Amino acid sequence: MLTLRILLPQLLKHMKLCTLRNLKKIRLIFMLMVCCMTSSVVFAADYATVLMYHRFGENKYPSTNIRIEQFEAHLNMLGNGDYNVWPLGKIVDHLQQGLNLPDKTVAITIDDAYLSVFTEARPRLKAYSFPYTVFVATQPVDRSQRGYMSWDQIRTLQDEGVQIGSQTRSHPHMHEISIANSKDELKISNERFLEEIGQRPKLFAYPYGEYNLDVIELVKQAGFDAAFGQNSGIAHGYNGFFELPRFAMNEQYGTIDRLQLAIDGLPLKVDQIVPEDVVLNENNNPPNYGFTLAPEIANDRQLRCFNNTYGKLEVNMLGPRAEIRLPGPLAQGRARINCTMPGSDGRWRWFGRQFMIP
């Protein structure tokens, strides 16, 4: 590889003998010098894509399952493209400390500790030496529930370097239960992790990707470093570390095209989000939804937002402030609003939220 030590003397030599004949050589050497000087920082990033899986090869559950051939195609793309698969905990540490990550850094996460994680995903991930995180709800494991891993199998994963995260005790809809019950879910599961794997997880995944402001506060109080939902987007921490996004991968949404959009994604950084709470009620449904764009993208007017019921939504820009209006209320259950903006090199910026409507 050419280095500055080699290129600089050549540039000086040609400058001393500067003739029309040498101008092209001088320009070429100068361009190579610039490339060498910037190559160490051109891939610096402050974001990462987090993928989420559940079941592997369990075709009876298409909404949470990824077919084996799909998963193998995902691993092949990650293993043979210009991607960097990192442990989720390492990514969170870098983001929280303000340390740079390589561009196109990806984390693999798996929810619920189904048995197919051990029998199907594990050997395939090991073949690529990919790190990954498994979020575990302790009660199904304690009860030796059919279709789930055992504590022995979870300890095997841990011994192999897999990070174990928490997903409560019984995997409830946390925003629907009392604060006292939510505290117990976190407390009891943490105790079980200490008893079974010798440590309390640092990372948390909200069951079903559902939470409210009270739940977020309880997760912080329970000592977790970060928490993840099931809303699409690129993780960066600009607006905090307890509503971090992940791209869900299943049979329908696990195509190679969607995977590539996700792992090539760029962050759409926003803050001052309203409504602050993602659980809506009859008084704020439809929500007056809005947020403020980060300074580096504040002048971009190509923001587009979509909802799974109404399609493309009305977006009004007032300086860096985006106001999104829905034509009607969101239906009961879970609803998503995803916003995108074109980035560089044909890549897309992503920001998504999942709302709950009782």
Image (tube, grey):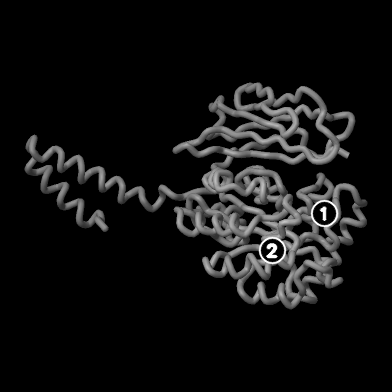
Residue pictured at 67% horizontal, 76% vertical: 156
Asked which quadrant contains residue 131, the reply is bottom right
Q: Which numbered circle lies on residue 218?
A: 1
Q: Is residue 224 above or below residue 24?
A: below
Task: Tell me residue 288's x, y (percent).
Answer: 77, 27
Q: Is residue 93 visible?
A: no
Asked which quadrant contains residue 96, the reply is bottom right
Task: Tell me residue 208's x, y (percent).
Answer: 78, 51
Which residue sits furthest front? 60
Give whichever of 91, 173 is nearer the camera. Answer: 173
Give whichever of 79, 240 is nearer the camera. Answer: 79
Give whichever of 49, 34 is nearer the camera. Answer: 49
Give the alpha-carbon distance from disc 2 to disc 1, as whole Å.
Answer: 21 Å
Quadrant for the N terminus in the image: bottom left
Residue pictured at 25% horizontal, 54% vertical: 4
Q: Which residue is mark 2?
A: 134
Q: Amino acid at mark 2?
A: Val
